[in-house]
Image (cartoon, rainbow, N blue to C red):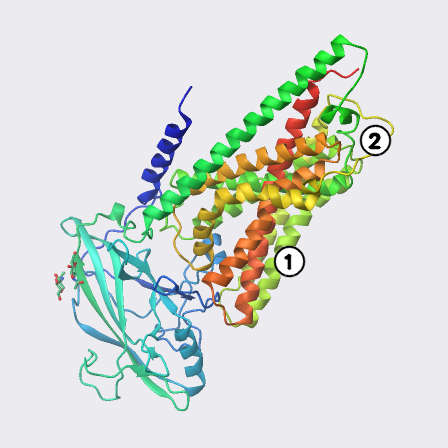
Amino acid sequence: MPRPRAWFVGSVAAALLTTAHAFYLPGAAPHDYAEGEVVDLYVNALTPMLGGSDNAKLKSLINYDYYDTRLHFCEPEGGPHKEPESLGSILFGDRIFNSPYDIRMLEDNGTCKTLCTIHVPAEDAKFINDRIREDYALNWLVDGLPAAEMKQDTKTGDLFFDMGFNLGNDEDELAETPALNNHYEIVLRYHTPRPGIHRIVGVLVWPTSHATTEDVSTDCPLSDAPPVILSEDQPTLVRYTYRVTWNESDTPWATRWDNYLHIFDPRIHWFSLINSLVIVVFLCVMVAMILYRTVSRDISRYNALDLSEDVQEDWGWKLVHGEVFRPPRNPMILSVLVGNGAQLCAMVGVTLVFALLGFLSPSNRGSLATVMMVCWTLFGGISGYVSGRVYDSLGGTNKRKASFLTATVLPTCVFAIVFLLNLFLLSAGSSGAVPFGTMLLIVVMWFGISAPLSLIGSYIGSRHGGISHPVRVNQIPRQIPQSPRYLQPWAATLLAGILPFGAAFVELYFVLSSLFASRAYYAFGFLALTAGVVSLTTATVSILFTYFILCAEEYRWHWRAFLTGGGSAFWLLGYGIFYWASRLSLDSFSSVVMYMGYLLLLALLDFLVTGTIGFLATYWAVRRLYSAIRVD
Ligand SMILES: *[C@@H]1O[C@H](CO)[C@@H](O)[C@H](O)[C@H]1NC(C)=O
Ligand SMILES: *[C@@H]1O[C@H](CO)[C@@H](O)[C@H](O)[C@H]1NC(C)=O
């Protein structure tokens, strides 16, 4: 017998090795700069940043365009123009524009330059000051690398690059109003693999604040100048300056992302993760073994009894053999949910495989979301097929309506939620709102590709027909006795959800942090492992609960299997609210609405995925169970 524990730890270690170092899109080629070649600096939307200290809280969830007119940043000649972006990158809030910074490879080392001088009007000063108080960060991109602040991990002492840098400075306890950063010390690290060829391997920015007067003779800020405080009563003069320093580095281009993908306190992270995974795997094995043993004992007893005597004393789950395959109520809704859940499962699975193979490189912005969207669209056929076959198996008759609903209901729901959130973002003046063209593209993808595929899938699915059942259904339904309280649908759902949730919640923390606090997330090895354990646990737990309710002579298991499978979604919702209370301190109403909206969406999708896993696994198990006994 293989030692499961050693094997398990081994595979975790393997996942660790492949994910602790960044991996790169095979096709992504480095950009070779010649000396004096223009190095473009792009500006992305301003995002709220998680402050440096351990108990820092995120204060907002709303992004603003860099060239939002209230921010008064220097614009390039001829006005800013937008850079092309991938679908996923737009959906995740990237809004990339060009900038007036004049940077040339290895030129002007250490010279200060003035970008522009502007007067910030009094009416916009409050807007900027509020953003500084909310710890907003500027996000620049140079050669695909985000500009970062160098920070030191307080626990391990490691230096790492924290993406983004502060718009202003709110640390000074004495000052009533925060200071706006108007001077940027830009350090560009370059690597020279061959003479004459240079590659950018690190972008660091130290922003500082220096008040200025109209007639300064030097471009460099005076070191004894007081910070820039934007007055809310009269216009304030702000001179934006920057200095580029070129610093040679021996980091090769291939590992330039490693500095960015810093994992805070890795040991605690790994230990708790491995612990929870080990516990859950052992639980699963235990549950499976108990189930297997009792069930095979039941079966041999049932079959032995039938042989020996005429006395037919049935008990337990065999009693309901004439009822288990009685179609549930609302088979159409159930099959629509299962079909869409199967589509989502396939999407998640394929995306994780892509991520594990290293196709979702961090320099390919938004690739994760793009791959997810494309997979979801192309897997429309799966939803139709699964829903068609399940509907047939549940004795449904109105196949056309079922396939139509499968193709349309979920996309419409998701789209409606996103659309409403978008309205909120627009009303908050945020740039995070998805542009109209992108919305249109998504509608075209969903209703032009995914829905027809789903209809074709339904057609093929109903041609293949339903699944045959090993025992016949009685004419007259049996009486159902009162089942114990812990088997009542809602109690069972919540109880059953604990295990899969327990397997996932450490990872969930990181996923939520990367979704909402824009922390980079690249531990896909762990995510895939966790997803595997969650689906195993979900399947086992729903089979177990179905076994219990069948033993209690309650035969309406179809919906309950789906609910118990999806139970972890309710815990996810609860955890999301806990995360909100402990890690976020959202001031504005629109931020709260955004958070709740996305959390609901996340829980809904999780409910569909885990519910489907629970239902399909249980269906399989029930068929196996009842084909093992002899019924006269
Ligand atoms: C730029 O200047 C810094 C010091 O100011 C120096 O360390 C660095 O080597 C210089 N880089 C180049 C390419 O001359
Ligand atoms: C250049 O890099 C070295 C380490 O690689 C560092 O010690 C030095 O401070 C850097 N110079 C500047 C100007 O950042």
Estimate how packed mark 2 is, as few (under 14), some (14 to 19) or many (20 or more) residues with alpha carbons within 10 Å: some
Q: Nearer the viewer, residue 41 or 340?
A: 340
Where residue 258 appears, x then y in whole percent? 28, 49
Image quarter where ligand 2 lies: bottom left
Where residue 581 appears, x then y in whole percent? 50, 63
In the picture of the structure, the residue carrying the numbered disc 1 is 416
Can residue 445 be seen here? The reply is no
Residue 492 in the image: above or below residue 595: above
Residue at horizontal 69 percent and vertical 32 percent from the top? 389
Residue at horizontal 58 percent and vertical 33 percent from the top? 540
Residue type marked 1: Ala
Q: Nearer the viewer, residue 206 or 361?
A: 206
Q: Residue furthest bottom?
A: 234
Residue type marked 2: Arg
Q: Secondary structure at mark 2?
A: loop
Q: If the image is split into quadrants, where does the C terminus sit?
A: top right
Q: If the image is split into quadrants, where does the N terminus sit?
A: top left
In the picture of the structure, the residue carrying the numbered disc 2 is 478
Q: Quick check: 222 left or right of 291?
A: left
Q: Nearer the viewer, mark 1 or mark 2?
A: 2
Can residue 279 be seen here? The reply is yes
